[in-house]
Amino acid sequence: MTISIPEKIRGRFMEEVLSLYSKAELSAGRASEMLGISRAEFYEMLSQRKIPLPEKLNESILKELSKLK
């Protein structure tokens, strides 16, 4: 038996997942898994919606880059 989820509910779920990700409450891997898409598709979605990476992630990336210098 297959259950069809109405588009309105799917949209709300997606918005909630994106909100949790932007607050660094979900990883990109977990968020993409919850949405049933690849991580690359998830990052593309963020780009299209102009959703920035969480500040924690930005700080982590900058810290790693500074170690490389």
Image (tube, grey):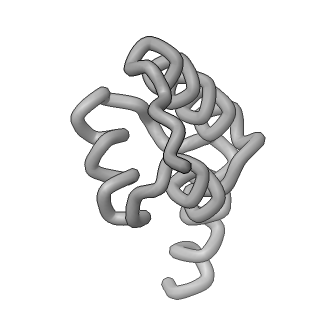
Q: Position of residue 37 (x, y in %)?
A: 40, 58
Seen in the picture, residue 57 relative to 45 is either above or below; the reply is: below
Q: How many marks?
A: 0
Seen in the picture, residue 57 relative to 7 is either above or below; the reply is: below
Q: Position of residue 32 (x, y in %)?
A: 51, 55
Q: Residue furthest front?
A: 1
- Asked where in the image residue 40 lies, by quadrant, the reply is bottom left
Q: Position of residue 68 (x, y in %)?
A: 52, 87
- Asked where in the image residue 55 lies, by quadrant, the reply is top right
Q: Please name the residue shown 44% across and 20% down the image.
A: 6
Q: Please name the residue shown 61% across and 24% down the image.
A: 16
32 and 69: which is toward the camera:
32
Q: Is residue 55 left or right of residue 25?
A: left
Q: Please name the residue shown 31% across and 29% down the image.
A: 50
Seen in the picture, residue 18 relative to 56 is either above or below; the reply is: above
Q: Please name the residue shown 60% across and 51% down the image.
A: 34
